[in-house]
Image: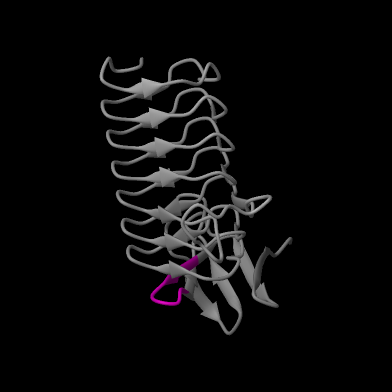
Amino acid sequence: MIHPLADCQSNSIGKGTYIWQFCVILKGAVIGANCNINANVFIENDVVVGENTTIKCGVQLWDGVHLGKNVFVGPNVTFTNDFTPRSKAYPEEFPRTNVLDGVSIGANSTILPGLTLGEFCMIGAGAVVTKNIPARALVVGNPAKIVGWVDNDGKKMKKKEPNFYVDSKGELWQEEDIKLKRVKE
């Protein structure tokens, strides 16, 4: 469903995707199935949006931004794609920003260019992300810092002992080298 007040130039829109009023989606953009693109969203050409992704109002996805499956992008999240922006001066290639599957990005967050947000990580509202975020990390602040770890449902894991965490299903995880790994029994 494409709202009649949207300007959708792309022919690569997946089945079951909703694009609401006042959206602009340029010709080269690729949008997966079952997405929800809320009002006032702008999507440039070199952008990929994975299936089952929600993009809330007031978000712009610039060239080089690739979103995985089941991603949530909160209202007014700001992506950037140029380290040295100048009017009418364009880089030969824009840095690639990769938001992996299952990521949630809180309202009014800012994501600098060329970063990777690891699977299932959660970015707190208003955070300024200046470096890569590992899978399952919960980050907040400016600059964003890890304050915990989350499971697939976005629930904060409970600390069991130093460097060990338990998810909502009772599975044990170990923090090692700023990464979280499930402990196999």
Residue 66 vs residue 29, the one in the foreground: 29
- Most extreme residue toward the right is 185
42, above or below 171, in the image: above
In the image, the segment drawn in magenta is 138-144
* Residue 16 location (% of width, % of height): 43, 17
- Residue 7 in percent (x, y) is at 36, 22
In the rendered image, which quarter is residue 162 located in? bottom right
Q: Is residue 139 above or below residue 91?
A: below
Q: Say if the magenta span includes residue 142.
A: yes
Residue farthest toward the bottom in the current orientation of the protein = 162
How is the rendered protein coloured? Answer: one colour
Number of dots carrying numbers: 0
Q: Residue at x 36, y 56 (%)?
A: 106
Viewer-side residue, 89 vs 32: 89
Quadrant assignment for the N terminus: top left
Give the residue at x 39% y 37%.
Answer: 42
Magenta-drawn stretch contains 25: no
Left or right: 126 as drawn, with respect to 46: left
Q: Relative to residue 1, is residue 119 drawn left or right?
A: right
Residue 21: image quadrant is top left
Q: Position of residue 184 (x, y in %)?
A: 73, 61
> Compared to 62, does 142 lie above or below?
below
- Residue at the location (50% across, 39% down)? 70
Between 85 and 40, the one nearer to me in the picture: 85
- Give the residue at x 52% y 71%: 130
Above-or-below relation of 93 to 137: above
Q: Relative to 176, is 4 on the left or the right?
A: left
* Quarter in which the C terminus is drawn: bottom right
